[in-house]
Image (tube, grey):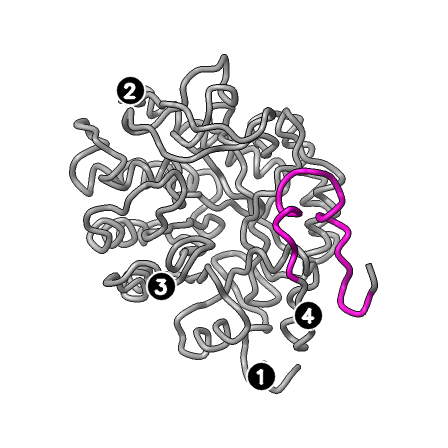
Amino acid sequence: MTGQSAHTDLFSPTRLGALDLVNRIVMAPLTRSRANDDGVVGALQATYYAQRASAGLIVAEATNISPQARGYARTPGIWSDEQVAGWRLVTDAVHAAGGRIVLQLWHVGRFSHNDLQPDRQPPVAPSAVRAAGQTYTNDGMVDVSMPRALDTEEIPAVVADYVHAAQNAKRAGFDGVEVHSANCYLLDQFIRDSSNRRTDRYGGSIENRTRLTLEVVEAVTSVWGGDRVGIRLSPTTTQVGDTPLDSDVIATYGHLIRSLNRFGLAYLHFVEGVTGVDRDAVSGIDLDALRSEFEGPYIGNNGYDLDLALARRAAGKVDAVAFGRPFIGNPDLVERLRTGADLVDAPKDAYYGGGAKGYTDWPMAGQHG
């Protein structure tokens, strides 16, 4: 190890719930838009994830739980047998390389377009409030569509879709699942009073607005057990669809986190600041105090480099650290961090779409591309 990293346990084994990890470095979920039009992944993704299996834990890219959950073209699904078979190639490859991988369960809610929805229906949301921004379709970037509000009677079917996806993730050989309740997608849309204007049992009070996330977690843990289920939250992320913050972030997410403790979850995966933008973009909200309400393992995410990871681990503020974009161009990121090797900064045009180029063709340290 370098002198900088010689006196840390960041590169030592640990345990998150039932998940035994070889180190405390987590590969964050990264949407790469390389599934086929049916949401099926395969050999290309198996190579990609196996190359990065030295991470203590891989959180696979956000994966649609149903056709209704889709918000972007060429993103993977987990509702069909063909999708399960494709993901099995991935999990087998990761396990053969000595890694651990969980699947992030995703429903985008209102951040979608009619062209991406079954029978070109409107996207669904807690309330009929259109999001700002554009999404990616097979015809390029388009403005997101006007959503319709879910009827109260429809919500159990959404929960059932999470259960079906969780069951399929088990069939596909994953080591667990992560409930995506962050980044202003469906579950987060229900949590925030800025996007939830309902008057039924899923709207109004904090208890009502957090109800759906808790129902989903309860349902998913019935499939996996709490110690193989994680959850991702992003209380101060605003840029996806320009969803404003909740009017009382600390009270709302504090209630949610305390309520989650009863499930004995494997971890809380927490976006600190605004996803991919700034760790300190929102002032006056003590995220460390908020996340300290969680009684289980904590994964810190957003803008981490080695110095920050070492400092926050040394201070006991994280149990593990999630790196996202650095894993794109550095399949051997853990070793590069451990030894102090230079990191490759992948260009943005490699992030989304295409094939192997910019995806599986990044060399390991010491190799030449």
Q: Is residue 208 above or below residue 125?
A: below
Dot 3, crowdedness within 10 Å: few (<14), some or many (≥20)? few
Query: Which residue position is annotated with label 1?
Result: 4
**Towards the viewer: 213 or 327:** 327
Give whichever of discs 3 and 2 has the lower sequence position: 2
| First in residue order: circle 4 vs circle 1 | 1
What span is colored magenta in the figure? 345-367
Q: Earlier in the sequence, mark 1 or mark 2?
A: 1
Q: Amino acid at mark 1?
A: Gln
The residue that label 3 is drawn on is 280
Marks 3/2: CA–CA distance: 37 Å
Upstream in the sequence, badge 4 or badge 2?
2
Rendered location of residue 322, percent (x, y)? 52, 60
Q: Which residue is mark 4?
A: 335
Residue at x 51% of width, y 43% of height: 104
Circle 1 sits in a helix, a strand or a loop, which is it?
Answer: loop
Quick check: 25 above or below 115?
below
The label nearer to you, 1 versus 2, is 1
Residue 272's spot in the image, x, y percent? 39, 60
* Residue sitting at x 62%, y 46%: 351
Three-letter residue code for mark 4: Glu
Give the residue type that dot 3 points to: Asp
Residue drawn at x 32%, y 54% as measured from the top left: 261
